[in-house]
Amino acid sequence: MQKNVKGTNLQVCSLNPKTGYYRNGLCDTCESDQGSHTVCAEVSEEFLIFSKALGNDLSTPRPEFEFEGLNPGDRWCICASRWLEAADAGMAPPVILEATNEKCLDLIDLADLEYHSLR
């Protein structure tokens, strides 16, 4: 079992919509996960617009990938680098620490995640 940023077992981020690199609801990762989909975030309208502007449209349904598209308030495992870009731009969506993989700490400071944690 992979660990979260608090050092305990990684919790489920979302089963509806089903998220994660493996689409198992967890922000777990592996060597082939080039994007490091490790940050469990509750996406906002602002973040969805920001991500789309950077070339990753998360709101448009893509049935060929069994992806219904995200709506504000949905929880999703997002790439650590994209979350960091959003944070630097003042657009970071809130994170769920218990469901955020400790692997993201390779790129993001824990203090930044705690500052943006969903309370």
Image (cartoon, rainbow, N blue to C red):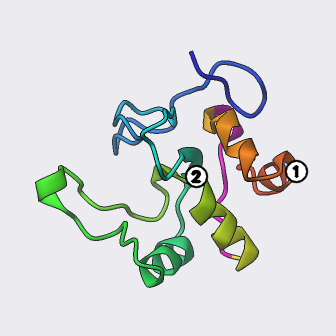
For the residue pair 56 and 71, the one nearer the viewer reads as 56
Q: Residue at x 58, y 52 (%)?
A: 41
Q: Label 2 vs label 1: CA separation?
A: 16 Å
The tag on residue 103 is: none
| Residue found at the very far top of the displayed protein | 1
In the image, what residue type sits under mark 2?
Ala
Apparent side of residue 76 relative to residue 111 in the rendered image (left or right): left
Q: Residue at x 18, y 49 (%)?
A: 66
Q: Residue at x 70, y 34 (%)?
A: 102
> Label 1: which residue?
111
In the image, what residue type sits under mark 1?
Ala
Residue 16, horizontal then vertical, whole percent: 35, 41
Magenta segment, which residues?
91-98
> Label 2: which residue?
41
Q: Quick one: SS at disc 1?
A: helix
Q: Reply above or below: 47 against 31.
A: below
Q: Residue at x 63, y 35 (%)?
A: 101
